[in-house]
Amino acid sequence: MAKPTLQERVWRAMRQLRSFDLPQLVATTETLSETTRAYVHALRRSGYLVLRNKHFVLVRNTGPKPPRVLKDYMASNKRPLGVEDRNTGERFGVDGKEPPPAPAPKIVPRPIVRRPYRRRAA
């Protein structure tokens, strides 16, 4: 079985704790504080978490698969553009903005199947 990714560990801990602060989440998941902080703030900016009395509260628990942060890798700052929910397929923008468009589906050409030539019986 594959080792869970950082996002999977953090998301699982958020779902179990429901209310947490960053040091508690980092200690629970045994992850780096900077990457955990970036993931948590991307989820907060897209509406998954709210900040109440220095604690984050999970308000959008959509299922076991962790939300994926969508970034603009062409930009130098790589700021999050939105979050894609892997459970529902929905996309949410950050700070109330429109989410980025879904990528166009890849068109894969069908392979040509050549059947062997059969000689007809005479």
Image (cartoon, helix red, strand yellow):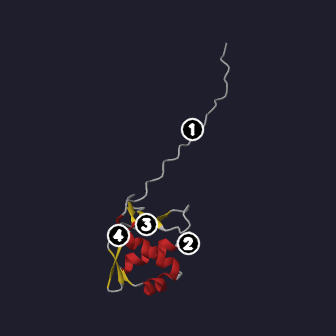
- Give the residue number, with chain letter if any, for mark 2: 3
Relative to residue 55, is residue 33 drawn left or right? right
Q: Earlier in the sequence, mark 2 or mark 4?
A: 2
Q: Residues within 10 Å of mark 4 (few under 14, many from 20)?
A: some
Q: CA distance from mark 2 to mark 3?
A: 18 Å
Callout in the foreground (2, 3): 3
Q: Earlier in the sequence, mark 1 or mark 3?
A: 3
Q: Would you identify the image quadrant in which residue 76 lies?
A: bottom right
Q: Earlier in the sequence, mark 2 or mark 3?
A: 2
Residue at (36%, 86%) from the top-left corner? 54
Query: Residue 73 at x, y = what percent?
Result: 55, 62
Q: Amino acid at mark 4?
A: Gly
Callout in the foreground (1, 3): 3
Residue 54, placed above or below residue 81: below
Task: Name the quadrant of the C terminus.
Answer: top right
Q: Would you identify the image quadrant in which residue 85 lies?
A: bottom left
Q: Amino acid at mark 2?
A: Lys
Relative to residue 95, is residue 109 drawn left or right? right
Q: CA distance from mark 2 to mark 4?
A: 28 Å
Q: Would you identify the image quadrant in which residue 64 lies?
A: bottom left
Query: Residue 9 at x, y = what percent?
Result: 48, 75
- Give the residue number, with chain letter if any, for mark 4: 47
- Give the residue number, with chain letter if any, for mark 1: 110
Q: Earlier in the sequence, mark 4 or mark 3?
A: 4
The answer to whether the residues at label 2 and label 4 have Cβ atoms under 8 Å apart is no
Residue 120, placed above or below residue 60: above
Q: Residues within 10 Å of mark 3 (few under 14, many from 20)?
A: many
- Give the residue number, with chain letter if any, for mark 3: 67
Q: Earlier in the sequence, mark 4 or mark 1?
A: 4
